[in-house]
């Protein structure tokens, strides 16, 4: 605070604080609070309320139909019969309108009922999807770590500067392409009649339903979020003094022990950050499972949330589900910090 | 623990076009404190890394205890390396640092803990074992690094300027401590340094190195008193330099013609008349004269500055662009008025005539 004042002066400090405050309240706290609030209520109606509403709708329909009949009658040639008919229809319309207003007066307005009902809705199939998503995201995180750690270590410590730059470029270039296109590329590769199955066919294997089995989602996700794992680990490993590795080696440590006792402990904060980012992105991913499964495999939890919001049009249950996912992600962060014994400060570094 | 000898046979090291170490022959005797002394970039660290096994020589072979070390990795050699920055493991406690090598050799925890504390006692850190390295002072870290290296019972301990990060007082203290540990354990120490004072105080023998070439390997006294090259004469200790040509050589002394007239000195390499040479005189062998006497080996000078170093006094004089220094003890007989001195002189047996060559930078 004092530093801010010293560096930027009172006016700029006020502007910075205002912008930061607006951002925190308007973009983070506000929407979350609204979502939590929404998740805690649902529209409650009396037991016969539905029947009444349906009757009112029906009566409105009948009134409309009578209106057409009346118009037909009015088009007839003038005669006493015509007048009688019109009068009869008008009477009928008036009668129905009276009934409508009576019913409408009787109709119960729906009320907000606060309860945990929206959260309790998550049972059976839904809870299975939730846990499957969490488990799958953990698996994606794990696979991404196993893939990224050797890459990060190689780039940071083994490769010559020129080679390291080349590998980094190779990692970054694909990310200049739109995410959807990258996922579509995997779709083409892993499709039932895609590249991989074609190659498998050449050596005599039957095609493998990668996408239908859900394996495609894994592969595409690991690929989609690999950078978020590589960079934090790379940054952490990069700061490790090469002499530490050499000292361990000189004292007789085999390669795996060097990693277990020297490199991994040093890289812990980076690994924690990488795991948290990859997990959050995987658990919150919508496009990857949507494109890669196209409904042929069980949905991701995010797809369920989307359906609640925009297909069932039930924002309350959608909010409850979204909030549940958020809580799961926050719990994952704390678990990671526990597991790696790192504090917020280490991660911030 | 027992020391082993280290032998370099025609060992050289090239990095691309750059030759870091020219073909070198060197024998370090078992159980001696051997220093490789040279300015930074002279290739001394490269030699150390080749002995430790982190670098493979471009040519030649290294033997430790008579065994050829080619294709033997650093972890299999009977050597332990102490790094310039010590490279203690910051996340492990002090005793775990010391026990690391034993852990890698499959020792049980209790046993290696006992051994680690035993070694920490040796370096007077028995009560600091549970701390993290960051909680120790520079000198203590130094000793932890020594204990960690000794834990694996090496026959050769390689030290890469480990004292360079310490302040002067501590450095002087650590010198004697390292020397003591070396005596106690009998392990061969190969010590890399650019600090000639360090090399002189600790070592049995010194190799003076310049630009990838070892110029002289001798005992400390011999290197200081009888340098073999101009570089060794100026890098190890200070020297006053007179350039000239030998006019007359007889026996073990010679006369040179310099811009200060004829100067006489010893001629240990029996250089022939006509040779371009430098005549070196140590500052502590220089004497001041109140007035120019015209006697041989006398140089007219004017006073520049007097530096008090406590027990010593350094006097600086110059003649034109040439500067000269005189080093005297701060005894009662020390000069009251160095500025009144008009000439310097030295005895012929204190002049050392060597072939003209590169001299160390000031």
Image (spheres, rainbow, N blue to C red):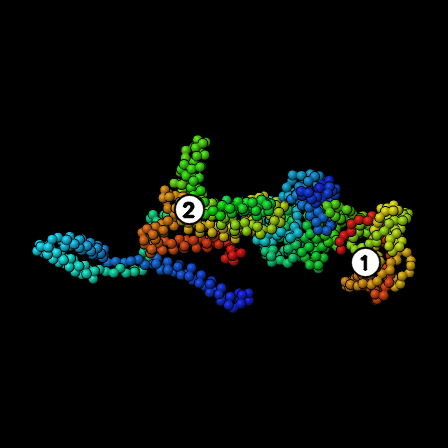
Residue farthest left in this picture: A80
Left/right of residue A34 with respect to residue B148 in the rendered view: left
Q: Position of residue B211 (x, y in %)?
A: 73, 47
Front residue of B206/A92: it is A92
Left/right of residue B289 with respect to residue A177 in the rendered view: right
Left/right of residue B61 with respect to residue A13 in the rendered view: right
Q: Nearer the viewer, mark 1 or mark 2?
A: 1
Helix, strand or loop at mark 1: loop
Chain of the residue on which disc 2 is drawn: A
Helix, strand or loop at mark 2: helix
Residue for point 48% across, 65% down: A15
Residue for point 55% across, 45% down: A167
On whether disc 1 and disc 2 are found on a single subunit, the reply is no
Residue for point 88% across, 52% down: B257
Front residue of B44/B8: it is B44
Q: Is residue B98 above or below residue A197?
A: below
Residue A96 at least partly seen: yes
Read off the residue under disc 1: B321
Front residue of B247/A259: it is B247
Read off the residue under disc 2: A288
Residue A319, picture quadrant: bottom left
Q: Position of residue A154 (x, y in %)?
A: 56, 45
Residue for point 68% across, 41% down: B57
Q: Report, in whole angstroms, how far the alpha carbon at label 1 lies from the one at label 2.
A: 78 Å
Q: Is residue B62 above or below residue A78?
A: above
Residue farthest bottom in this picture: A10
């Amino acid at each position: 605070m004092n530093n801010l004042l010293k560096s930027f002066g009172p006016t700029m400090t006020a502007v910075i604080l205002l912008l930061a405050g607006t951002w925190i309240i308007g973009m983070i706290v506000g929407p979350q609070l609204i979502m939590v609030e929404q998740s805690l209520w649902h529209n409650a109606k009396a037991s016969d309320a539905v029947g009444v509403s349906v009757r009112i709708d029906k009566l409105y329909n009948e009134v409309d139909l009578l209106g057409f009949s009346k118009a037909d009658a009015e088009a007839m040639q003038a005669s006493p019969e015509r007048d009688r008919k019109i009068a009869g229809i008008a009477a009928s319309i008036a009668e129905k309108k009276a009934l409508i207003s009576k019913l409408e007066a009787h109709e119960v307005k729906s009320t907000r009922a606060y309860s945990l009902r929206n959260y309790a809705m998550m049972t059976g199939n839904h809870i299975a999807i939730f846990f499957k998503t969490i488990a799958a995201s953990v698996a994606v995180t794990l696979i991404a770590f196993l893939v990224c750690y050797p890459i990060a270590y190689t780039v940071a410590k083994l490769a010559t500067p020129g080679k390291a730059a080349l590998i980094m470029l190779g990692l970054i270039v694909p990310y200049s392409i739109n995410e959807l296109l990258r996922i579509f590329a995997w779709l083409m590769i892993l499709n039932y009649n895609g590249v991989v199955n074609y190659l498998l066919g050449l050596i005599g294997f039957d095609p493998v339903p990668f996408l239908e089995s859900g394996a495609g989602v894994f592969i595409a996700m690991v690929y989609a979020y690999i950078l978020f794992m590589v960079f934090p680990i790379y940054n952490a490993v990069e700061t490790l003094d090469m002499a530490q590795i050499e000292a361990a080696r000189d004292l007789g440590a085999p390669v795996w022990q060097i990693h277990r006792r020297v490199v991994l402990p040093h890289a812990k904060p980076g690994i924690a950050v990488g795991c948290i980012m990859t997990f959050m992105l995987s658990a919150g991913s919508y496009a990857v499972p949507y494109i890669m499964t196209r409904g042929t495999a069980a949905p991701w939890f995010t797809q369920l949330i989307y359906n609640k919001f925009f297909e069932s049009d039930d924002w309350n249950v959608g909010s409850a589900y979204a909030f549940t996912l958020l809580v799961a992600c926050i719990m994952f962060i704390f678990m990671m910090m526990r597991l790696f014994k790192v504090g917020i400060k280490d991660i911030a570094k | 623990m027992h020391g082993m000898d280290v032998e370099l046979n025609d060992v050289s090291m090239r990095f691309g076009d750059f030759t870091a170490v020219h073909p070198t022959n060197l024998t370090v005797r078992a159980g001696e404190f051997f220093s490789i002394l040279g300015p930074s970039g002279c290739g001394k660290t490269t030699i150390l890394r080749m002995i430790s096994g982190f670098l493979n020589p471009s040519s030649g072979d290294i033997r430790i205890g008579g065994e050829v070390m080619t294709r033997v990795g650093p972890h299999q050699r009977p050597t332990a390396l102490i790094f310039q920055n010590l490279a203690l493991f910051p996340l492990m406690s002090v005793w775990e640092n010391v026990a690391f090598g034993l852990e890698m050799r499959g020792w049980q925890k209790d046993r290696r803990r006992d051994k680690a504390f035993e070694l920490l006692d040796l370096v007077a850190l028995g009560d600091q074992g549970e701390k993290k390295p960051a909680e120790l002072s520079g000198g203590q870290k130094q000793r932890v690094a020594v204990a960690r290296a000794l834990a694996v019972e090496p026959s050769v301990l390689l030290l890469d300027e480990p004292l360079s990060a310490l302040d002067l007082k501590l450095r002087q203290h650590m010198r004697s401590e390292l020397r003591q540990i070396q005596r106690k354990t009998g392990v061969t120490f190969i010590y890399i340094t650019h600090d000639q004072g360090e090399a002189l105080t600790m070592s049995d023998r010194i190799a003076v190195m310049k630009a990838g070439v070892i110029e002289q390997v001798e005992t400390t006294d011999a290197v200081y008193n009888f340098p073999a090259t101009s570089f060794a004469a100026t890098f190890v200790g200070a020297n006053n330099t007179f350039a000239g040509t030998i006019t007359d050589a007889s026996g073990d002394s010679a006369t040179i013609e310099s811009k200060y007239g004829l100067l006489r000195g010893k001629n240990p390499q029996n250089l022939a008349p006509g040779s371009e040479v430098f005549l070196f005189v140590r500052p502590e062998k220089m004497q001041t004269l109140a007035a120019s006497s015209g006697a041989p080996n006398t140089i007219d000078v004017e006073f520049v500055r007097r530096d008090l170093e406590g027990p010593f006094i350094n006097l600086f004089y110059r003649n034109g662009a040439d500067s000269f220094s005189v080093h005297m003890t701060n005894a009662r007989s020390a000069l009251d008025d160095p500025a009144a001195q008009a000439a310097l002189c030295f005895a012929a047996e204190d002049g050392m005539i060597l072939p003209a060559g590169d001299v160390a930078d000031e």
